[in-house]
Image (spheres, grey):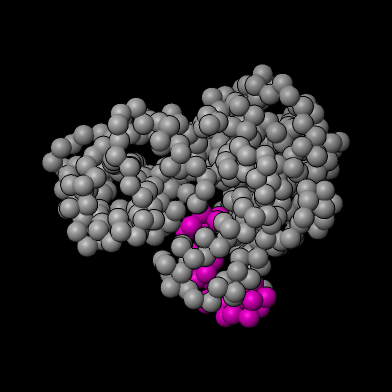
Amino acid sequence: MLSRTISSTIISASNSFPVLLLTGPRQVGKTTLLENLAKTNRNYVTLDDLEQRNLAKTDPALFLQINPPPVTIDEVQYAPELFSYIKIYVDKYKKSGDFWLTGSQKFHLMKGIQETLAGRVAVIDLLGLSYAEMSNRADQNFPFLPTADRLKIMQRNHPEIRTLTDIYKIIWNGSFPKLFNDKNRNRDLFYKSYIRTYIERDVKDSYQINNDIAFYNFLRSAAARTGQLLNYADIARDVNIDSKTAKAWLSILERSGIIKLLQPYYNNITKRIIKTPKLYFMDTGLCAYLTAWDSFKTLEAGALSGAILETYVFTEIIKSYWYNGKDPNIYFYRDDDQKEIDFIIESNGKLHPIEVKKTATPALSDIRNFNVLNSLKKEIGEGALLCFRQNIIPLSKNVTAVPIWYI
């Protein structure tokens, strides 16, 4: 098994809280990771097992007697009835690390967690493998920020040189551990099975949506809009549903970690900033499969090429923060004049602009919109142009061209 950057974050949280909740989409390695981190004999039970699920829902006290702590409970969202009994146990024994919970429906879980286990649970998010993990540098990864000190560390930790072809192969294949670890696994069959399981178990069971075909078409329509401003009416029109249903279904995708909505940076000083969020798929391989690109070559040459590269960068930035136990203050910028900045990371009171370009020859014209941030009356920090140049090079006094694989 590959080392995961998030491992130290999980161990630290487990040593401080009686309950650990590890959330994320299916197949990102939640259970495998916890199994490898367990240093004591822990009981294990999954609520995908219908008998165990029924017992947990109808007799939670007996369920915990049969599966006593320390215990890992998989897919705990299926039995929120357990939370009150877990609270009683941890309040009585006050022992760190007794309960490790996993769930693929974070927002579905949070209501019960907040009502019954507030102050007793550490919530940690997991996605697929980061590029650092794929290249065996899990322990060298840190939150991405284009400051001078971190750029020096990036240069020291990234001796390998990658090409556009290398990155698009990763983008097309995706970040699910099973696909990365088993090079002979059929990618298309994996994603076909993944979508079927997701719709059958997460969507139909949790949200009572019975129109499989319409939801699948909705999923494909959303994938085609990764990296774009969200427009409920357009997606609804594609699938022949109303905007209210589109909003509800998009919320389901977000709750299950399939997508994330990125909010624009907004400042009352500038009224012309667009307030609509952007939609991003959290796994580029799943996105490429849903939009029917049959190879990394056709994906790289096709209409989705730029948007999916931006999506890949977004997910890598998110992973670099989440896996180090931090939440990124990340936004995008777009105004009525169509001036746009792909990402803005706010850190220590400064705004750090980031642009993504599919080029190996970066130029000042690629970052021409960075100066719009001056109108926001905020301190502007170092910026970056993430591209396919093979080494770091300054573009201006405060902006550096950085290889995409350095994130």
**Total tally of numbered discs in the picture:** 0
Dominant SS of magenta comes to helix
Does the segment drawn in magenta span residue 216? Answer: no
Does the segment drawn in magenta span residue 249? Answer: yes
User: Which residue occupies the foreground of this view, 317 or 376?
Assistant: 317
Which residue does the image show at 54% across and 24% down from the upper left?
Answer: 139
Question: Which residue is outermost to the top?
Answer: 156
Percent position of residue 294, x then y: 77, 55
Percent position of residue 146, x then y: 64, 32
Residue 311 in sight from this viewpoint: no
User: Which residue occupies the foreground of this view, 159 or 156?
Assistant: 159
For the record, the magenta segment spans 235-260
Which residue does the image show at 50% across and 36% down from the upper left?
Answer: 323
Judge from the rendering whether residue 144 lies leftward or rightward of residue 308; answer left or right.
Answer: left
User: Which residue occupies the foreground of this view, 145 or 316?
Assistant: 316
Percent position of residue 180, x then y: 63, 39
Judge from the rendering whether residue 329 lies leftward or rightward of residue 333; answer left or right.
Answer: left
Which residue does the image show at 26% across and 57% down from the upper left?
Answer: 56
Say above or below: 244 vs 288: below
Q: For the C terminus, which image quadrant?
A: top right
Instruction: Say which quarter of the image contains residue 92.
Output: top left
Which residue does the image show at 43% across and 73% down from the upper left?
Answer: 208
User: Which residue occupies the foreground of this view, 166 or 406?
Assistant: 166
Judge from the rendering whether residue 150 lies leftward or rightward of residue 397; answer left or right.
Answer: left
Residue 256 in sight from this viewpoint: yes
Percent position of residue 264, x then y: 59, 55
